[in-house]
Amino acid sequence: MSLFARFVNWWNASPYILTFNVHAWFSCTLVYHASIAMHRHFHLRLLYCAIAVLVLWILVTAWKEFWFDLRYEVPAQTVADSTADFIGYRIGDVLAVLLMAIGA
């Protein structure tokens, strides 16, 4: 049994749960820090920075998941896999917005 398989079995999760969490936490980190950096650099309201980052990030992740991954990822990814990854990104976006709302 590989080290990865032992880790997955250790906390009784599937690779789908792991990839969902990776997409969510990556998106949360990126959106949060990009919004804060834009806010500090351009001295704009944090709300406007967050909206700009989110719109761009949603477009980029939609392109990545539903065009690039479906055509070029090896092994081939299904639409269900792409949808799960895209939803993971959106959950991360919600977490980032909540962190900004509470002032963390």
Image: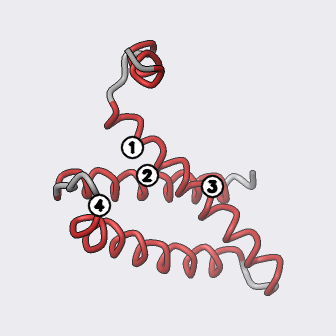
The answer to whether marks 4 and 3 mark residues whose Cβ atoms lie closer than 8 Å is no
Secondary structure type for disc 4:
loop
Counting from the top left corner in percent of width and height, residue 89 is at: 43, 57
Q: Earlier in the sequence, mark 4 or mark 3?
A: 3
Q: How is the image coloured?
A: secondary structure
Q: Could you tell me which residue is drawn at 39 percent across and 21 percent down?
A: 5
Task: Say if 33 sits above or below 57 in the image.
Answer: above
Q: Could you tell me which residue is drawn at 61 percent across and 62 percent down?
A: 30
Secondary structure type for disc 3:
helix
Q: Name the residue that disc number 2 marks.
A: 91
Q: Earlier in the sequence, mark 3 or mark 1?
A: 1
Q: Earlier in the sequence, mark 1 or mark 2?
A: 1
Q: Could you tell me the amino acid type at mark 1?
A: Phe
Task: Say if 42 sits above or below 86 in the image.
Answer: below
Q: Could you tell me the amino acid type at mark 4?
A: Glu
Q: Name the residue that disc number 1 marks.
A: 20
Q: Which mark is residue 76?
A: none
Q: Nearer the viewer, mark 4 or mark 1?
A: 4
Q: Earlier in the sequence, mark 4 or mark 2?
A: 4
Distance CA(mark 4)–CA(mark 1)? 17 Å
Distance CA(mark 4)–CA(mark 2)? 23 Å
The answer to whether marks 1 and 2 mark residues whose Cβ atoms lie closer than 8 Å is yes
The answer to whether marks 3 and 1 mark residues whose Cβ atoms lie closer than 8 Å is no
Q: Name the residue that disc number 3 marks.
A: 29
Q: Nearer the viewer, mark 4 or mark 3?
A: 4
Query: For mark 2, does the 10 Å Cα neighbourhood hold few (<14), some (14 to 19), or many (20 or more) residues?
Result: some
Q: Name the residue that disc number 4 marks.
A: 73
Q: Quadrant of the N terminus?
A: top left
